[in-house]
Amino acid sequence: MDRKQEVLRQLREADGYVSGQQLCGTLGVSRTAVWKIINRLKEDGYPIEAVTNKGYRLLSVEGRDLFNREELERRLTTRWAGHPLIYSEETGSTNADIFGLSDSGYPQGTLAVTSKQTTGKGRRGRTWISPPGVNIYMSILLKPDFRPETAPMLTLVMALSVFRACEELYGNECTFGIKWPNDIVVSARGEDYHKICGILTEMRMEEKEIRDIVIGIGINVNQTEFPEEIRQTAGSLALALGREVSRADLTAAVWRYFEEYYERFAGAQTLKPLREEYERALVNRGRKVRVLDPSAPFEGTAVGINDLGELLVQRDADGGLTPIGTGEVSVRGVMGYV
Ligand code: BTN
């Protein structure tokens, strides 16, 4: 435990004030050093009161969006998903970080979390806009012994995990769904769905086997302003709920669900055990979609997924079913984004 964590622990456990002298004694540092640690905690967002002759007192952190390694570690209840946890205030891309950590021998379950990305990656070579201090950007390392064809299904496993975490924490305030294959969308006050989460799964191969996989998740949590070009489709939890949300609570809930769903998925190596649950979350279900197949685009109704996670589209033209593989073609809602 580093000094900052130790001071925080003592403040949390104290029933009232902790004197500067006590902190100096237990940490074996000077008063100036204690004062500096307290200032760093304040910068992290902890409301600490300092009173002459009494010392320091931690005020209520209820409802505050404190996002740092300590807050995340305190909440993570998983056995392997999220351990070890590598937190940074800022990085290029957590997906890239995870590949680097994998090269250094880090194990399955390693999680990189940050509060700001400077080169966030989205799907199809796009940029994932990653402003500081408001959202969650995180990536997990997996080293499964699956066949490589299995890997794209992990994206759906992750989508279901984020969906369930959102439902559990905020489901009585707004409506969540999954836009196939892996966008999490939210609708509040009967308004249109907006995308609040994107998932980017990347895989590296060695010979014909999986070397490692990174699943990266970007969740728009407390962001309230969006660039013009994505304003129609993008949203955030805070905009939907009308209040600020704890990123640490949401992060911990995501990994709790992911660990459970991943284990169910890994047993079968298909989506069969999760299919029904996924379909219940699927907002495309029963909706008109346009399949943007460059050689033969068509329209139909999305009816569900199969065990491989492909979207089953009933063609308008002849009523037959076409399974659409993830990454093969784009599927657009005929009415709006979903
Ligand atoms: C999408 O385009 O919908 C997927 C976006 C994925 C963004 C996340 S943010 C954390 C991780 N690091 C990245 O560079 N990208 C993913």
Image: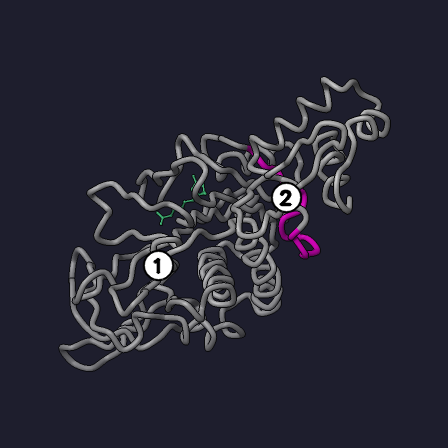
**Which label lies toward us, 1 or 2?**
2
Q: Secondary structure at mark 1?
A: helix
Asked if ligand 1 lies within 8 A of label 2, the reply is: no
Q: As rendered, which of 6 and 268 lies closer to the eye?
A: 6
Compared with residue 294, is residue 49 higher up or lower down, i.e. above or below? above
Is residue 242 found inside the magenta-colored segment of the image? no
Rendered image quadrant of residue 300: bottom left
| Residue occupying image coordinates x 36% and y 52% | 236
Magenta span main SS: loop
Judging depth in this view, the residue of 120 and 148 nearest the camera is 120
* Secondary element at tag 2: loop
Q: Is residue 63 above or below residue 97?
A: below
Which residue range is magenta in the image? 75-88
Question: Which residue is under mark 2?
Answer: 59
User: In the figure, residue 239 lies in which quadrant?
Assistant: bottom left
The image's mark for residue 240 is: 1
For image coordinates 43% across by 68% down, the residue present is 308
Left or right of 43 on screen, residue 116: left
- List the single residue furthest toward the front: 53
Which of the marked residues, 1 or 2, is nearer the chain's N terminus? 2
Quick one: 151 or 32, which is closer to the camera?
32
Residue 46: x and y in percent read: 60, 38
Question: How many neighbours does mark 1 have within 10 angstroms: few (below 14), some (14-19), or many (20 or more)?
Answer: many
Residue 21, percent across and down?
82, 26
Position of 177 with respect to 210 (left or right) is left
Q: Amino acid at mark 1?
A: Ala
Image point (45%, 68%), residue name: 171
Quadrant of the frame with the N terminus: top right
Q: Position of residue 316 (x, y in %)?
A: 16, 77
Q: Residue furthest bottom?
A: 319
Alpha carbons under labels 1 and 2: distance apart: 28 Å
